[in-house]
Image (cartoon, rainbow, N blue to C red):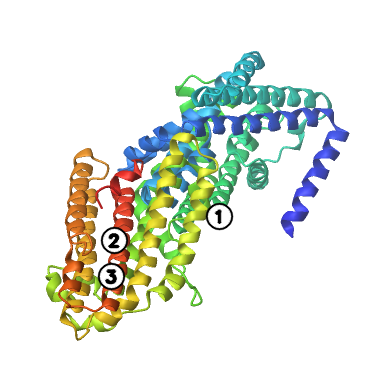
Amino acid sequence: MLRKIFFPTMLILLAYGFWISPNFKEISAGVAIFLFGMLSLEEGFRVFSGGTLERILKASTDKLWKSISFGFVSTAIMQSSSLVSVLTISFIGAGLIGLTQGIGIILGANIGTTTGAWLMAGFGLKVKISAYAMPMLVFGVIMIFQKAKSLKGIGYVLAGLGFLFLGIHYMKEGFESFKDSIDLAAYAVLGFKGLMIYIGIGIFATVIMQSSHATIVLILAALSVGQITYENAIALTIGANIGTTITAIIGSLSSNIEGKRLAGAHFVFNIVTAAVAVALFHPIISLVQIIGDHLGIAAQNHMLRLAVFDSLFKIMGVILFIPFVDMLVRFLNTIFKEKAAPQTQTYLEPKYLNESALEFPATARKAAMDESRRLFDHSSKIIIEGIGLDIDALYSEVSLEALISDPCCQSIPDVQKKYETELRGNYAKITEFIIQAQSHLEKEHINSFYNLKLANRNSIEAVKMMQQLQHNLRRYIHHQNPSIQKQYHKIIERIAKLLRRIKQIKQVMKRQEETEANKAEAMTQLQRAKKILAKNDIVANGKLDKLIRGNLIDNEMAASLMNDSAYTNNIIKSLIVSTGVLWIDPDGDIQIYREEI
């Protein structure tokens, strides 16, 4: 209800401001153009996030100082802590990085935002910046209309920078014109009261614009023409730092519990840092004066001194927090707990799928892969139970012969019921997620998602074949005819052998994922499994004919055995295809896993 009232009220207030003041209109247009430039810049960098950025992130977050460095450098280059925050939340949601690394990136991103203030204070507000904007916009728009992905990305970056510069120009011009009619500096409030009022204004402005970067530039533009005092500008900067947490909180709403924990860390960091800045306001101002004098910054150059304060304020916060990162992680893990699945839940609830993972190809693929592997493991568990074996015993050193003769074979659960209650909903959710991911991907990323869809279908088909096999398995596994009983023991053995082999393949790939040597070893094991299992096909090896000719089984048994042998083959084929895609090569030709079966 509040949201429905807030948006039209804001539009009415803006329209009223435009009507009474053309100067306010120029400032607002400058802010709008600046924000549009940030969106274009983010879009440009998103084009290059199809692998390079993700690989750098994974390689640069194994230690806290590396995570902080990555956050600083990426924000300084992209001039968007919002994009870095969204990227980090997506990677945490997909499980590519942990919460500690994510907090490090956010800490570094906070320092990275200070580079924008230095650029604007030292360069952007002292020259006719609009002269640089026009060529960037022209070349940028031309490149955006090109088909090549890289050219499009460069075009968005150039256009984004052009709009940023143009927005800064209009903000500065608007404040200069404003001064001729209204001197906002006359409304300055000094002391603690002014500090709190202007912190509130800074929070409000940043929440509205969803960009602390835009707020800082607006503050610098107003300060450059004397429309606000230096002390009030500092208070606005503190408020902008608090307001920027709203972006992370909004970004975390569609994420999983880890994304929410990161947003909580961002909020705690900025609030505590702001509280320390308020408590030590005058000592920090004195320290800024000392640093400014040491750097040769004139006492009247309030813009550069504000940049010094912004840097000192944020670096101080990071140094303050570094010793307490592990404690903060434990605190957030206590506050934000995984919700238990509701008692009425009728399917395996997705663990890795969330909207934030759809933001980038790498995170979408990781989330879909992890959930697909989870579906495969659960499908395998149902198949193991369906053939009457205990999952822990199967993956132990106990011989298959001993396991198959175990009395547990007498109590086989209903596979169809387990499919309906545990797998069906999860399978539908994964399929929906993959379709969503494919809808905004480039061609080079679509094939792996297509293979994932096929792998999931094969995992489900294996369970459905188990449903067909189960009826006769229950009937003949303890039949008085030793010949038919033996053949159904062989069926169980074939499936159990494959599942043991699949576990070995998974262990090979987990040693160090995506190495060519491990892939080759896993592929060799899979090929070996296919050949051994193919030889045990009762129809292909002629064993069924011998049983019939020797009158060891009757016609009904023969028909059942023939059908169930086919179901077994289909289970094996489906599990092999899923294993190949999910653990060996998700981008490869899926037909190679079907060969020689």
| Residue hosting label 1 | 253
Check disc 2 and give the amino acid type.
Asn
Going by the image, does 298 lie left or right of 93?
Answer: right
State the separation of the CA atoms marked 1 and 2: 45 Å
Task: Report which quarter residue 416 is drawn in.
Answer: bottom left
Q: Residue at x 67, y 32 (%)?
A: 229
| 1 or 2: mark nearer the eye | 2
Image coordinates for residue 337, horizontal then vertical, percent: 44, 65
**Sequence-wise first label, 1 or 2:** 1
| Mark 2 neighbour class, 10 Å CA radius: few under 14, some 14 to 19, many 20 or more | many
**537 and 57: which one is in front?**
537
| 3 or 2: mark nearer the eye | 2
**Sequence-wise first label, 3 or 2:** 3
State the separation of the CA atoms marked 3 and 1: 38 Å
Quick one: quadrant of the N terminus?
bottom right
Check disc 3 and give the amino acid type.
Ile
| Residue hosting label 2 | 569
| Residue hosting label 3 | 384
| Mark 3 neighbour class, 10 Å CA radius: few under 14, some 14 to 19, many 20 or more | many
Q: Secondary structure at mark 1?
A: loop
